[in-house]
Amino acid sequence: MNSLYRKLCDTGCHILPSNDTIVHAYEALDKELRDTPNIDARTGTCAVTVLIERLNDANFIDGGSSSDDSDTEASAMKGKAAWCGDCRALIVNENGSFTALTKDHKVSDNEAERDRVEKALQNPQPREDVIDTKFWKKTEEKMNEIGEIPRPHSFIGHRKNNLGAEVGKPVIFAHTNGLSLQISRSIGDRLAARSIIATPEIREFSLKKGQNYRIILASDGLFDVFTNEQVSKLAWKRRDPRKAAKMLASRAKSRRVLKGLSTDDITAVVLEIRV
């Protein structure tokens, strides 16, 4: 499958694409993933993209040597952050202060997303691809035994443990006993609720002249065990941004192991920009 970058170039490789171009790239990748044959229908992913327009001589550093004094006349920069799901992007100043460019797409923590999903669920439609299956007949029988009515459509609820007690934060179910996701936006996930969309949210930002920044892009494998504040404090602990990214991923892995969490979803990218 083509990357988001290639999708953006397919629609016109601009330095700073329009919002429509960014949305098209995300939704095109979602369709490609859903239409790919012989792939697990549960396959899906979150994504975050940061696009920056360099107005003159601002310097990007991804692990190379820093600029010399002749680059001090660099102009300000502007950019866009686009995200779908719970990947995050942070802008971290050299003094450790930071700006969160993203907010997780979760009905448990994002009021705007919960409102969007609840509106989408006001007139729920049964999943025709489910209700005629043997799986659904067994679900109906099981639910009837405990005096509950199965729902053949999407809804917000809680997962349950083996004793039937609700656990964790609210999630979005595709239907009773169907796929449930904490996130309300994702790419792929054919079996997810229809209210889970691939349309990214987009935020514009600017970088001031005379400042040094590090932009952190990372998956929930990092942010499940570190807060934005903690990540911002670690961002400048290594001179080389590539080593900073490796350090973040390594510390996240160690912390996840201690907590008994999986270690297969840890991605961190650190980009240094001198404006």
Image: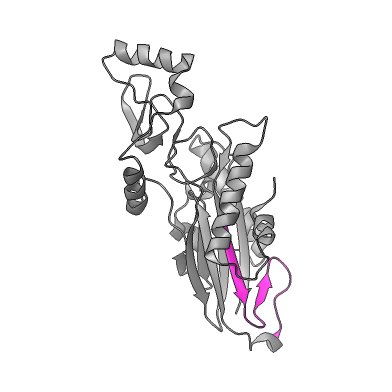
Taking the spot 60% from the left edge, 55% from the top edge, the residue there is: 25
Taking the spot 36% from the left edge, 45% from the top edge, the residue there is: 117
What's the magenta region? 49-68
Examine the rendered structure and indicate whether residue 43 appears above or below residue 56: above
Examine the rendered structure and indicate whether residue 33 appears above or below residue 246: above
Residue 216, image x and y in percent?
A: 56, 61
Q: Quadrant of residue 8?
A: bottom right
Residue 209, image x and y in percent?
A: 55, 83
Q: Is residue 112 magenta?
A: no
In the rendered view, does 126 fall on the left or right side of 31? left
Is residue 216 in view from this perspective?
no
Q: Residue furthest right?
A: 64
Quadrant housing the N terminus: top right
Q: Quadrant of residue 14?
A: bottom right
Q: Residue furthest left?
A: 147
Examine the rendered structure and indicate whether residue 67 appears above or below residue 138: below
Q: For this rendering, which residue is in front, 113 or 229? A: 113
